[in-house]
Amino acid sequence: MEISYSLNELNTIATTILQTFPATRCFALYADMGSGKTTLIKELCKCLGVVDNVSSPTFSIINEYQIQGTQQKVFHMDWYRLKNVHDAIEAGVQDILLEPNTYCFIEWPEIAEELLPPNTVKLKIKNDGTYLRTISNGLVS
């Protein structure tokens, strides 16, 4: 999958991602600073039915949201401030990744990539320098 989109098409992109990977609960987003990882995660959460204020967990490392009308949770993680796998384990990310029936959206997964479950969908976002983004999945270089 490779799709180019503008911010006006975020809802369509988020819906497409969730429909393309209906059984997947863990998504790792690879992108440069300012490429729209948090913005896309906000839209994915909205499509799932999260009504909480979704914001970047840069300092808290992990934000937890509830999907309205369900017992399902969404975890939004930002591993940017972690130094290594040990930091990630100490922050509790490994336990969260093992929780059943939860969604996990991870920014900066490179820090502790070996902790990602095998069925993680890896999404790479590229900013073309204007208002367009390109998102692709598969092997991330």
Image (spheres, rainbow, N blue to C red):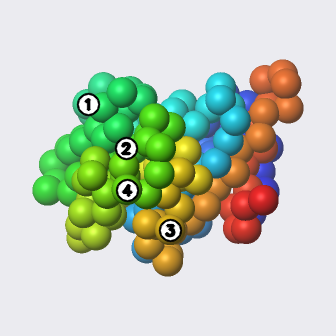
Q: On the rendered structure, is 3 left or right of 85?
A: right
For label 2, the residue is 76
For label 4, the residue is 86
Q: CA distance from mark 2 to mark 3?
A: 18 Å
Q: Residue at position x 42%, y 29% from top?
A: 58
Q: CA distance from mark 1 to mark 3?
A: 30 Å
Q: Nearer the viewer, mark 2 or mark 3?
A: 3
The residue carrying pointer 3 sits among few (fewer than 14), some (14 to 19) or many (20 or more) residues within 10 Å by Cα, namely: few
Q: CA distance from mark 4 to mark 3?
A: 11 Å
Q: Does the CB distance between marks 2 and 1 fall below 8 Å?
A: no
Q: Does the CB distance between marks 1 and 3 fall below 8 Å?
A: no
Q: Amino acid at mark 3?
A: Glu
Q: Nearer the viewer, mark 4 or mark 3?
A: 4
Query: x and y percent of residue 120 in the render?
Result: 51, 68
The answer to whether 58 is drawn above or below residue 101 in the figure is above
The answer to whether 27 is drawn above or below residue 114 in the figure is above
Query: x and y percent of residue 133 in the render?
Result: 76, 36
Q: Amino acid at mark 4?
A: His
For label 1, the residue is 52
| Dot 2: element | strand
Front residue of this view, candidates 31 and 80: 80
Q: CA distance from mark 2 to mark 4?
A: 19 Å
For label 3, the residue is 114
Q: CA distance from mark 2 to mark 1?
A: 12 Å
| Dot 3: element | helix
